[in-house]
Amino acid sequence: MAKIEDVSADQLLAGSSILSRPAEEFENDQTIEAMWAMKAFEHAEVYFNILCSVDPKLLKLTPHDDQIYQTFREFFKDLKVDVINEDELKSEAGKARWRPFCEQFKDVVEDYSFGTLLRADCSKDYSQENSILTSRIQFYAIELARNREGFNDQIRQKFKPKKLEKAKP
């Protein structure tokens, strides 16, 4: 797979409109994979900086936060959100359990199925070991629960916002 740093800014700009097309149109295109990875990483970095700067209980992630959180807790009453077990999301049983929840938001949340990085352990920063690729709606559901239930409160004390790096032309 191509490394993110091997993709030029021109390639990223030229490919930005491609990312909105259905994934089924592409066969293991390394440039597309690198662009998806970069977009997911940038989203993660921005979100983490916000967590480091603002009281998580005050964050509004979407116009549908209340609906997402309420539905999430109806479907997953006892799901631990502080440390996520990846099997609960990605095993066959996990996928079967999550699918009906996710599909409810297909026409409600923009890019609900977009690949998004989620911290497995919410007390830690994003890292290769602490990141799980999930759908956007799973990210929203779990992060809304973490924010509302106080699990992300410690982030501001533990971490400082990172300086965001811009792509070089």
Image (cartoon, rainbow, N blue to C red):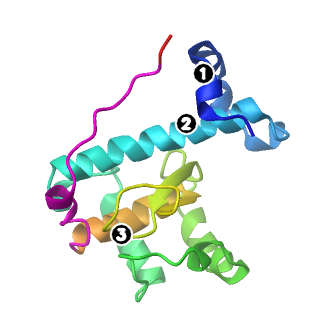
Task: Give yes or no for residue 90 being in the magenta stretch.
Answer: no
- What is the quadrant of residue 18 in the picture? top right
Q: Pointers 1 and 3 in contact (CB under 8 A)?
A: no
Disc number for residue 119: none
Magenta span of residues: 150-167
Up the image or down, 92 lies above or below 117; here it is below
> In the displayed structure, does residue 158 sit left or right of residue 5?
left
How many residues crowd around disc 3 within 10 Å: few (fewer than 14), some, or many (20 or more)?
Answer: some
Tell me if I can see residue 4 in this picture. Answer: yes
59 left or right, relative to 103: left
Q: How far apart are marks 2 and 3 (CA)?
A: 27 Å
Label placed on residue 12: 1
Prevalent SS, magenta region: loop
Residue 94 in the image, given as x and y percentages of width and height: 63, 79
Mark 1 neighbour density, 10 Å: few (under 14) some (14–19) many (20 or more): many
Residue at 33%, 31% in the rendered image: 164
Residue shown at 59% from the left, 28% from the top: 5
Percent across and percent down for residue 129 are 51, 62
Badge number at residue 69: 3
Mark 2 and mark 1 in contact (Cβ < 8 Å)?
yes
